[in-house]
Image (tube, helix red, strand yellow):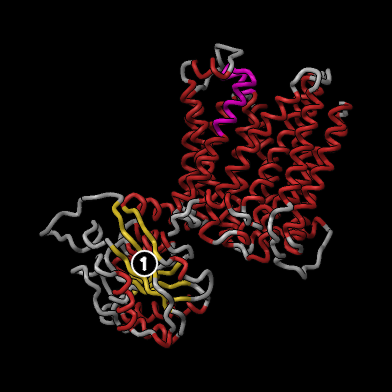
Amino acid sequence: MSSQNQFALLRTRRFAPFFATQALGAFNDNAFRQATIVLVAFHLGLTDQAVGFYSNLAPALFILPFFLFSATAGQLAEKFEKTRLIRYVKLFEIAAMALAAYAFQTHSVALLLTVLVMMGLHSAMFGPIKYAILPQMLRPEELIGGNGLVEMGTSLAILFGMLAGGALMAIDGIGPLAASGLVIAVACAGYALSRTIPPVPATVPDLRLNWNPLVETARAMRFVARNRTVFNSVLGISWFWFFGGVFTAQLPNYTKLFLGGTATVEILVLALFSIGVGIGSLLCERLSGHKVEIGLVPFGSIGLSAFGIDLYFAHPDPATLHDLGALAFLAAPGSWRIALDMILLGVFAGFYIVPLYALVQSRAQRDELSRVIAGNNIINALFMVGSAAFGIGLSALGWTIPQIFLATALLNALVAIYIYWLVPEFLMRFLSWLFVNTLYRIKAEGIDKIPDEGAALLVCNHVSFMDALIISGVVRRPARFVMYYKIFNIPLLRFIFRTAKAIPIAGHHEDPALLKRAFDTIDAALAQGELVCIFPEGGLTCDGEIAPFRSGVEHILQRRPVPVIPLALRGLWGSIFSRRDSVLGRSRLPRRFWSHIAVAIGAPVSAADANAATLRDHVQALRGNWA
């Protein structure tokens, strides 16, 4: 596994200008919106009813372009070179911010709402480019780290944009002028940076554009639904926006009525959440080992529910103290519990959302990804509208804001259970990730030897009952494991193996029908371009040495000649799941956790040059003397 961390991407031209461009876009979007809120609420002399009307109208106007133009944006991102499209979007942003500056000076609410629609269009057009460009500019092992940086940068840019836009507009006398200068300067800086992004070629240059939004929206939905894992990942992403939409919509009144705080407390709470998202997004790369680790998604959903529920119990009753500033709030009893809840909600939000975006990018077909992201944005918008309706409905029923938080957190648990029941791969990966990362520290060598696509047969020495989980935790592509049926049937692990579509096998004298079915399943998997991993020794080693490979590997290659990739496990002999222990010897109680092990991967061997003896020699050479 590469030791290079994600921050090294910020020193590369293929990523850094794009990262800065998208972060400035998120900054400007929120700076404009917060400046508009301050202007409308405090500088125009409007009644409370009018302010409330515009506050409810604004989110609807911003979301509207996502429904109308996302499908078209997805087509454009497939057909044209993406860097050129980014520059056009940035030029559009400059025009929108120039109009916003005029609206700030003239105090024109109608023009401000027009600009709000334009910024919604800006975001709708940029979204499919933003997420579809990452797999083209990053290597597979960089995808999770790149997504983590983008989510971290977006989260912090949103926070700083809100702070800057609101603070500048609040300056007496020159607020509109200062806010105007900020949004225009940032838009120009974004365009200048976009000109340094290297060209990223079109994925479907001969695509015929369809300008009918209804037809293309339906087609985008079909692209999303084509792959079940992608579809359920999109539902998971959209649910995150529902969850976040409910919480963020309630924060202004929550900080005022239940925390007794002023606007500075609301900013503090948002800052804590944003910092948490940044931390969680960055930790994803380290926890996932540079690969798309969807096992973090259930981990994230557990944390969202746990700390959402705790937020209710932390302060269920209205505040007795009022008009507290940020420092006074932090000095109040119980405030640190709320602060910790907000940070950890953000951390687990990062664990949840980053792998889902990376999974969509890695599993969707490359020539459909932009349109899949467009469909994702449309579904996100629907869920955001639903979150607003959910919050308004519960408020109308007389629910308090902490009760709304509690209901959302409990609903999140139910939705998570439903998603993981639909796609057990999420839960399987979580259990696998939990087992492996609790017991071992894994070093991988030669991970780039495994092809990103196409059939291949992996052969490996067999040391412990955890071998399949360890290899699946290292190899970025899903692999079908062939394993002895008695190991396949181990309680609890059976769920993981069955969900991973492992292939149970038995000896000829034990169950000839199962043996034949296993070889047929292996051949069908290879015919479909999948990875299949076998342990040719036929069982766990009893002495730590690699036993002779059986002829089954040759039988597989005779039926389906595919490249063979040797793997070697090091450091597992003597672990609690190996056969070094016995009933008469040392007990199987854990003697060491987080122990160092390694997976070494060798160069592919052609089917013509592969036989049981030579493949064993390759694996032996990779393992060396470290059993």
Tell me the quadrant of the picture where the C terminus can be found: bottom left
Residue 378 visible (yes or no): no
Left or right placement of residue 279 versus residue 446 in this view: right
Residue at 34% x, 49% y: name it.
Answer: 438
Is residue 619 located in the magenta-colored stretch of the structure?
A: no
Pick whichever, 514 or 210, lies toward us: 210
Q: Position of residue 374 (x, y in %)?
A: 71, 54
Image quadrant of residue 138? bottom right
Residue at 29% x, 64% y: name it.
Answer: 570
Residue at 42% x, 88% y: name it.
Answer: 608
Looking at this view, name the residue that lies furthest to the left.
584
Q: Position of residue 536 (x, y in %)?
A: 32, 76
Pick whichever, 296 or 418, lies toward us: 296
Residue of label 1: 600
Residue neighbourhood size for the residue with mark 1, other residues' Cα within 10 Å, grouped as few (<14), some (14–19), many (≥20): many
Range of magenta residues: 253-273
Looking at this view, name the residue that lies furthest to the top.
321
Q: Position of residue 341 (x, y in %)?
A: 49, 30
Left or right placement of residue 242 versus residue 460 in this view: right
Q: Secondary structure at mark 1?
A: strand
